[in-house]
Amino acid sequence: MTFPLPVPAELRRALLPGTEVLLGISGGVDSAVSLALLVELGCRVQCVTFKNFCYGDPEIELTEKSCCSLEAIEDARALAGRFGAQHWVHDLAEPFGRRVMEPFVAEYQVGRTPNPCLACNGDVRFPELVRLADRQGCSFAATGHYARIERRGEYARLLRGLDREKDQSYFLSRIEPVLLDRFVFPLGWWTKEETRRAAAELGLSVAGKRDSQEICFVPDGDRSFLFPEGPSTVPGDIVNRGGRILGRHRGLVHYTVGQRRGMGVAAERPLYVLELDLEKRRLVVGFEEELKVDFLTADRFLAQVPDFPDSGTLDDGVRARIRHRHRGVPVKNWRLSGEGLTVELEDAVLGAAPGQGLVLYDGDLVLGGGRILTAGIGPE
């Protein structure tokens, strides 16, 4: 069957017939349609599914919705077989545990809310895909992410996907720029709805499969099993900014800045988590307007473009995103010192959580990203 969506010229130029491509396949609809497109272009595709856990570990209870469950691996194997592609499972349990899960726990223990997808993509998944592509003699590696790679001149650049609701470039901002030229993201030019329609027209069994919306190693949303007993797991007081006790929390690991539900405190207006006070084991809450911040500091900044300037102003047209699905706000000014970044925003944002990613954009172009350390109100 002919592929049911128009194929962008950029992909045709990069992926000539016979090009060897290693596809990271999860068993979901996105990687399935990516596989179908690569085959349509005449690529010689190999497929790999990463195994991030020991499935015999009783403390990690995966469900069929998890992106790396045994069911997902079987779906991936069946899809590869349908298109005549070699498939294997690659064990990443040790580096995933060391570089993703252990830092995840460490961040919560100091009162930050980490984003494990940023760590996984930057430190584990994408470097390993390139390593395996080299081993297998593949020119490119591919995934089903909604983002784009632009190849102009000497450098490859990371761009947002055209589907603004599904765009995943935020999660890819920690990939070392030197690796970008080795990747293709076949779905970056389409919407999620178009991808699902294509899967249905191709008769793929996963066309209606639900997306994974959870942290892959916390499928039920309860993180507490990961943590040894300590300050972040011990119950304490829920207080407002003035220190007035409003109730009791069940351990700070269960909360994040900007969270609205699950506190069990009644008030005349909705309450939100403002701060995790680890020293006093207090959960600080307040009203929505108290979440507003316009001054951020970040560390571990990784520039995605060469010669990223050390400072800039509103005239440069840079926008900042503080989480996935955040549309971004103009940056009034910024200053970069080594891997440390200070950003003042033109407009206040709600719920900037320390530990999450701060990613800068120039239009669709990803300029770079770091980890939020502090969020507050800047000087007038």
Image (tube, helix red, strand yellow):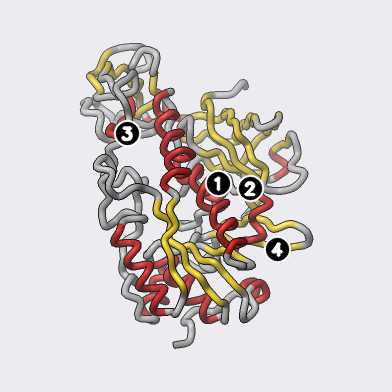
Closer to viewer: mark 4 or mark 3: 3
Q: Residues within 10 Å of mark 3 (few under 14, many from 20)?
A: some
Q: CA distance from mark 1 to mark 2?
A: 7 Å
Precedes in sequence: disc 2 or disc 3: 2
Q: Of the numbered discs in the image, which one, if any, rests on residue 176?
A: 2
| Tags 1 and 2 touching, CB below 8 Å | yes
Q: Position of residue 32 (x, y in %)?
A: 42, 70
Q: Of the numbered discs in the image, which one, if any, rests on residue 151?
A: 4
Precedes in sequence: disc 1 or disc 2: 1
Q: For residue 312, what is the image quadrant?
A: top right
Precedes in sequence: disc 4 or disc 2: 4
Task: Say what secondary structure mark 3 lies in.
Answer: helix
Q: Position of residue 172 (x, y in %)?
A: 55, 50
The quadrant the N terminus occupies is bottom left
Precedes in sequence: disc 1 or disc 3: 1
Task: Say what secondary structure mark 1 lies in.
Answer: helix
Label 3 belongs to which residue?
A: 226
Q: CA distance from mark 4 to mark 2?
A: 16 Å
Q: CA distance from mark 4 to mark 3?
A: 41 Å
Label 1 belongs to which residue?
A: 122
Image point (24%, 26%), residue name = 268
Q: Residue furthest bottom?
A: 1
Q: For residue 16, what is the image quadrant?
A: bottom right
Closer to viewer: mark 1 or mark 4: 1
Q: CA distance from mark 1 to mark 4?
A: 20 Å
Image point (29%, 56%), residue name = 65
Amino acid at pointer 2: Glu
Closer to viewer: mark 4 or mark 2: 2
Q: Could one spot residue 13 in this view of the protein?
A: yes
